[in-house]
Image (spheres, grey):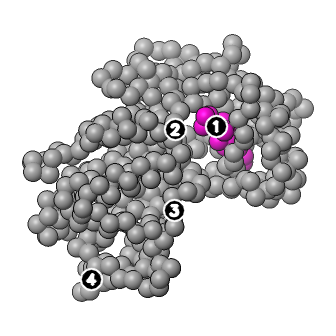
């Protein structure tokens, strides 16, 4: 997204992608209303909607009275996009890359694995990377590390990340979509039981499933085998009894340890980190992609003119972090609160299971559902997830940079 915006403004930019294609498995595939509005500002939202996607209007939770949608994005005003779009990230990345290729100042190098930073007199001047053709060198006025939570650029730069939430573990896997499967608004009600939580995301042609369990229990689950895992899933969601038959090998499951972290400093002379490289987000509200793209928009707003003038100052990079740090701190704090309470729930359900032979835990607490029936609260939750603290807009680089 940053490369697209810079190229659109006439800045020469080379995007290095470590993998030979975008076709691989990603943790998140959400595109929030805020991002759809950003894409609409540059004329891409309507074209994006022509690609395969699913709309999610709000989460539902099980109660004694049946599934209840706790809030509805369709109640949001002044937006063309009152929903979260679920789109496979390879499709989204390919879409952005193809749009960027329309600008003569954009170059994309696939299979470019960055191995070293070029530093001279304490300033980053570019990178050395490997391709199938061997070692290459790319010099640049500014190097941006947008290479995710395990960022090699961050490590090479000596910038450290501090953990901001306790980790929680889950298994991430796919199930086929079968005739007669439940229809929903993007997410089927999460299921709670025996100290575990099952979340099912409707991806149109398959289900993306997250299976949360108490930290430290992975080896026990693995040792029990795939058949036991299938039984665990069906005990939480009996409607998936046929779907789970597709699970035949433990390699179909990916273990994720979920925690948030943040770099105290996102930059050094000649270098900037954005997205998960600067601040790893939790899966809470699927916020990682939203905040990463907003980082890119603010960086493009602030750095286009300095890049065109071939003079990027230290304070320009510091300003990107200053504009973006507070919104990411807020969502990280909310995510940490959610993970902490989910962890407590998993432990408490595990303890109650050891004291009782009951099956699934009771439905979602009624008091939580009643809370969401209070005036304005559902709207506030929907707006916070959709847009965050404030909206970010794409600016004309010839205008005043005072707001981002």
Q: How far apart are marks 3 and 2 (CA)?
A: 19 Å
Location of residue 3 in the rendering, given as x and y in whole percent from the top left corner: 31, 59
Q: Which of marks 3 and 2 is nearer the N terminus?
A: 3
Q: Name the residue under label 4.
A: 122
Location of residue 67 in the rendering, given as x and y in whole percent from the top left corner: 65, 19
Q: Which of marks 3 and 4 is in front?
A: 3
Number of numbered discs: 4
- Range drawn in magenta: 197-215
Relative depth, front residue between 168 and 74: 74
Query: Which picture quadrant has residue 343?
Result: top right
Q: Distance between the residues labelled 1 and 3?
A: 22 Å
Q: Tell whether position 201 is magenta.
A: yes
Query: Which picture quadrant has residue 100?
Result: bottom left
Q: Do the residues labelled 3 and 4 touch (CB within 8 Å)?
A: no
Q: Is residue 248 above or below residue 203?
A: below
Relative depth, front residue between 322 and 106: 106
Q: How far apart are marks 4 and 2 (CA)?
A: 46 Å
Q: Earlier in the sequence, mark 1 or mark 3?
A: 3
Q: Which mark is residue 205?
A: 1
Q: Do the residues labelled 1 and 3 touch (CB within 8 Å)?
A: no
**What secondary structure is the magenta-colored segment mainly?**
strand
């Amino acid at each position: 997204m940053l490369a697209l915006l810079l190229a659109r403004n006439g800045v020469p930019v080379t995007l290095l992608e470590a993998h030979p294609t975008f076709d691989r498995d990603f943790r998140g595939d959400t595109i929030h209303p805020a991002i759809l509005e950003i894409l609409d500002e540059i004329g891409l939202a309507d074209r994006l909607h022509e690609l395969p996607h699913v709309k999610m209007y709000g989460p539902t939770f099980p109660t004694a009275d049946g599934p209840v949608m706790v809030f509805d994005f369709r109640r949001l005003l002044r937006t063309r996009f009152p929903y979260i779009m679920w789109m496979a990230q390879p499709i989204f990345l390919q879409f952005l890359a193809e749009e960027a290729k329309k600008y003569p100042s954009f170059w994309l190098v696939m299979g470019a694995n960055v191995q070293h930073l070029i530093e001279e007199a304490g300033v980053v001047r570019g990178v050395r990377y490997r391709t199938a053709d061997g070692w290459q060198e790319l010099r640049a006025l500014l190097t941006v590390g947008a290479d995710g939570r395990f960022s090699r650029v961050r490590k090479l730069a000596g910038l450290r990340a501090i953990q901001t939430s306790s980790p929680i573990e889950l298994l991430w896997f796919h199930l086929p979509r079968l005739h007669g499967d439940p229809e929903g608004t993007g997410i089927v009600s999460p299921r709670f039981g025996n100290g575990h939580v099952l979340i099912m995301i409707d991806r149109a042609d398959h289900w993306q499933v997250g299976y949360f369990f108490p930290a430290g229990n992975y080896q026990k689950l693995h040792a029990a085998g795939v058949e036991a895992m299938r039984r665990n899933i069906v005990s939480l969601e009996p409607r998936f009894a046929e779907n789970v038959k597709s699970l035949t090998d433990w390699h179909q499951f990916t273990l994720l340890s979920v925690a948030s972290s943040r770099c105290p400093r996102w930059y050094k002379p000649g270098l900037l980190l954005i997205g998960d490289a600067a601040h790893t987000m939790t899966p809470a509200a699927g916020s990682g992609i939203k905040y990463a793209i907003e980082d890119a928009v603010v960086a493009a707003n602030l750095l286009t003119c300095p890049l065109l003038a071939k003079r990027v100052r230290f304070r320009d990079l510091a300003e990107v972090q200053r504009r973006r740090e507070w919104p990411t701190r807020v969502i990280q704090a909310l995510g940490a609160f959610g993970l902490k309470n989910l962890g407590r729930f998993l432990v408490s359900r595990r303890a109650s299971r050891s004291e009782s032979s009951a099956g699934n835990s009771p439905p979602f607490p009624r008091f939580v559902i009643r809370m969401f029936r209070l005036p304005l609260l559902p709207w506030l939750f929907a707006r916070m997830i959709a847009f965050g603290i404030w909206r970010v807009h794409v600016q004309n680089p010839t205008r005043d940079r005072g707001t981002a």
